Amino acid sequence: MGLPDLKAVMIMLVGLVLAGCHAAPENHTGQSPQETKIKFSLDDIRPDGLRGPTDGLVAVSYEFCVPVSDQVYQEILRIDPDLKIHSDSPGRIGCEDSQALIIGETHRPDWREVLQELSTLTYITEIRECFFE
């Protein structure tokens, strides 16, 4: 390989390295960007939305915050009519005064699709497991 060929190869390699620097970061969790809003494991939840030992199966409750708005409430209730809206409590997740606490649960056959659709809404920043203690 002559010097001009080596120089061309080096320029091409530098270009490839620099192009890689601008690539979006890889998601090593195997989740979509929307699913990363879901801050609890879905792996141990059965298809029927329950988890735990056979003699103690329970639904998983979850919470998130949304802006206080009738239009927002209609949108999330279209996704899951069983969601509970609590505008008077920040929940463990810490909703702000301009937000309402929303509580849902997984005990339904389409629980995964519901969570995925909720996670696509831009005003929902995270969905956390809800513990009633």
Image (cartoon, rainbow, N blue to C red):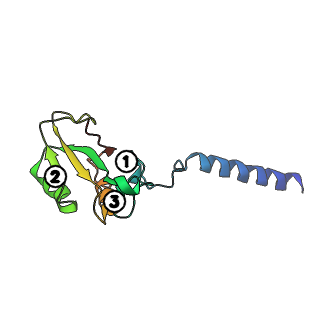
Marks 3 and 1, how far apart in space? 19 Å
* Neighbour tally class for label 1: few under 14, some 14-19, many 20 plus, Cα within 10 Å: many
**Is residue 108 toward the left or the right of residue 16 in the image?**
left
Location of mark 1 (residue): 37
**Is residue 27 toward the left or the right of residue 74 in the image?**
right
Marks 2 and 3, how far apart in space? 25 Å
- The N terminus appears in which quarter of the rendering? bottom right
- Mark 1 / mark 2, whichever is N-terminal: 1
Location of mark 2 (residue): 72
Relative to 99, residue 78 above or below:
below
Marks 1 and 2, how far apart in space? 18 Å
Contact, mark 3 vs mark 1 (Cβ under 8 Å): no
- Residue 78, position in %: x, y? 18, 62
Contact, mark 1 vs mark 2 (Cβ under 8 Å): no
* Neighbour tally class for label 2: few under 14, some 14-19, many 20 plus, Cα within 10 Å: some
Q: How many marks?
A: 3
> Which residue type does callout 3 highlight?
Gly
Residue 49: which disc? 3
- The residue lying toward the viewer, choosing from 54 and 109, is 54
Q: Residue at x 30, y 56 (%)?
A: 106
- The residue lying toward the viewer, choosing from 10 and 132, is 132
- The residue lying toward the viewer, choosing from 12 and 132, is 132
Relative to 102, residue 77 above or below:
below
For this orientation, the residue located farthest to the right is 1
- Residue 3, position in %: x, y? 87, 51
Residue 118: which disc? none
**Is residue 113 toward the left or the right of residue 81 in the image?**
right
* Neighbour tally class for label 3: few under 14, some 14-19, many 20 plus, Cα within 10 Å: many
- Mark 2 / mark 3, whichever is N-terminal: 3
> Which residue type does callout 1 highlight?
Lys
